[in-house]
Amino acid sequence: MKQAARDAVFAKVEAASKIEDPLAFFPLFKKYDRNGLNLQIECKRVLSLNSSTVDWAYELTRDNMMYFYTQVDWVWNDKEKMEQFKDERAFYLLAYDANSTPVAFCLFRFSVDYGNEVIYCYELQLERQVQRKGLGKFLMQILQLIANRTEMRKVIVPVFRQNTGAYRFFREALQFDIDVYSPSTFSTYGNSSIHEILSRQTKFGEAVGLACYGDPCYCCD
């Protein structure tokens, strides 16, 4: 990757990471009022959130995902996972009910992944009472809008192969593709990989497809 191109990628990601409220560009998406839900949506940096909200998001993720960790014999590491949730680069896209209680969230970062500027969605988790009401799709549509607005090349999300519901949701409802850097695309793993990296391109088009060669990215964070 030529130095000028490398610098441009990192500068774009850095600029996006400094935006205080990426949702401010899309005021019409600050409310979700359909399918029996009436929710307020906001986007905040982790540094602007109170610790109780971060703790709630972490506990919800553990409750929703622990089963899949046990199915693939992965170890859930509380310390490492909480570091991800509290990383100063993290943004939270949150949905609140009428009592200002959080009921769903998306945890993401602006990042460089194999030479490409991307939004990496680490988690999309919903409380049981708001599931299957279109909210998850709505939050991911917001993420796609933010990715386009900040000129990221794609939105990336990891999914356990065992989590067939989530896999179908991203592949069928949201039209995500298996990313070129997903484990299953490498002959070493193939169909034996326990998770897939899925992605959807933005209007800024084809991924550059350059190896990171030590550049900071999700794979070497």
Image (cartoon, rainbow, N blue to C red):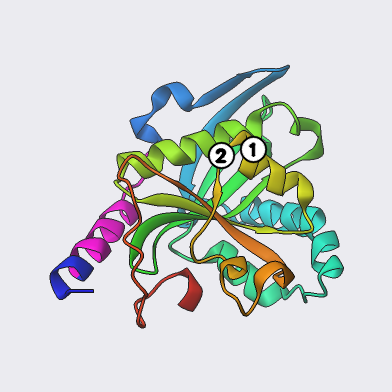
Work out whether 35 lies above or below 12.
above
What residue is rendered at 30% in x and 54% in y? 18
Q: Is residue 8 at all visible to an observer of this figure? A: yes
View extreme (bottom): residue: 214
Kindly identify the amino acid type of the residue bearing the numbered disc 2: Gln
Please state which amino acid type lies under the numbered disc 1.
Answer: Glu
**Within 10 angstroms of label 1, few (less than 14), some, or many (20 or more) residues?**
few
Quarter of the rendering containing residue 193? bottom right
Callout 2 secondary element: loop
**Magenta span dominant secondary structure:** helix
Residue 218 in magenta stretch: no
Tell me the quarter of the picture where residue 23 sits. Answer: top left
Q: Nearer the viewer, residue 16 or 216?
A: 216
Closer to us: 194 or 22: 194
- On the question of residue 21 being in view, the answer is no
Q: Which quarter of the image is occupied by the N terminus?
A: bottom left
Horizontal placement of 127 versus 221: left or right? right
State left or right for residue 40 relative to residue 37: left
Residue 160 pos. (x, y %): 71, 60
- The residue labelled by disc 2 is 175
- How busy is the neighbourhood of tag 2: few (under 14 within 10 Å), some, or many (20 plus)? some
Q: Which label was assigned to residue 81?
A: none
The circle drawn on residue 172 is: 1
Vertical placement of residue 201 versus 85, above or below: above
Tell me, yes or no, whether the two marked residues, 1 and 2, touch with CB atoms within 8 Å: yes
Q: In percent of the image, x 66 and y 27: which residue is there?
A: 134
Magenta segment range?
7-22
Residue sitting at the far front: 187
Residue drawn 35% across and 46% down?
Answer: 20
Residue 13 covered by magenta stretch: yes
